Image: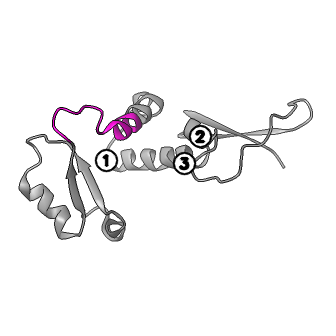
Amino acid sequence: MLELGERANRFRFLIRDRDAKYTGMFDAVFGADGVEVLRTPPQAPRANAFAKRWVRTVRRECLDRILIYNSRHLLAVLREYLAHCNQHRPHQGCGQRPPDRDALPAPVADLGAVRVRRRKTLHGLINEYEQAA
């Protein structure tokens, strides 16, 4: 909660599993800031499937390919990957659009007639392509 600062009031819920490492004190910290702590049902491995899928994706596409030096570097890498994921990476559930874009993707273009611009993100780990103006 300390690291979230002013952004902490945007959260209404915290979903967590029933691991013994989460004590009553853990729930009280979030409860004091108005965040309702929801525990996943017992013996329900699919209850937190969306979060587990995102963690698996960010690890496979990003973190398994970069040597992280410290927590500051980790936060910078995750911030850049999150921007890529929300603003450029196509999602099947959104009709192949990134979540932050409302417009449909541009139709397939003849690459011989248009110029394509490549932009490297995460120091060249991921390349983003878009039509040059």
Asked whether residue 124 appears in the rendered view, the answer is: no
C-alpha span from label 3 to label 2: 7 Å
Q: Does the magenta run of residues contain 114? A: no
Q: Identify the disc placed on residue 89.
A: 2
**43 shown above or below 12:** above
C-alpha span from label 1 to label 2: 25 Å
Marks 1 & 3, CB-CB < 8 Å contact: no
Residue 17: percent from the left, percent from the top? 19, 42
**Number of numbered labels in the structure image:** 3
* Residue 115, picture quadrant: top right
- Of residue 73 and residue 27, the one placed in the foreground of this image is 27
**117 shown above or below 133:** above
Marks 3 & 2, CB-CB < 8 Å contact: yes
Query: What stretch of residues is rendered in magenta?
Result: 41-55
Marks 1 & 2, CB-CB < 8 Å contact: no
Q: Residues within 10 Å of mark 3 (few under 14, many from 20)?
A: some
Residue receiving disc 3 = 86
Residue receiving disc 1 = 71
Asked whether residue 130 appears in the rendered view, the answer is: yes
What amino acid is found at the position of numbered circle 3 in the picture?
Asn
Q: Earlier in the sequence, mark 1 or mark 2?
A: 1
Circle 1 or circle 2, nearest the eye? 2
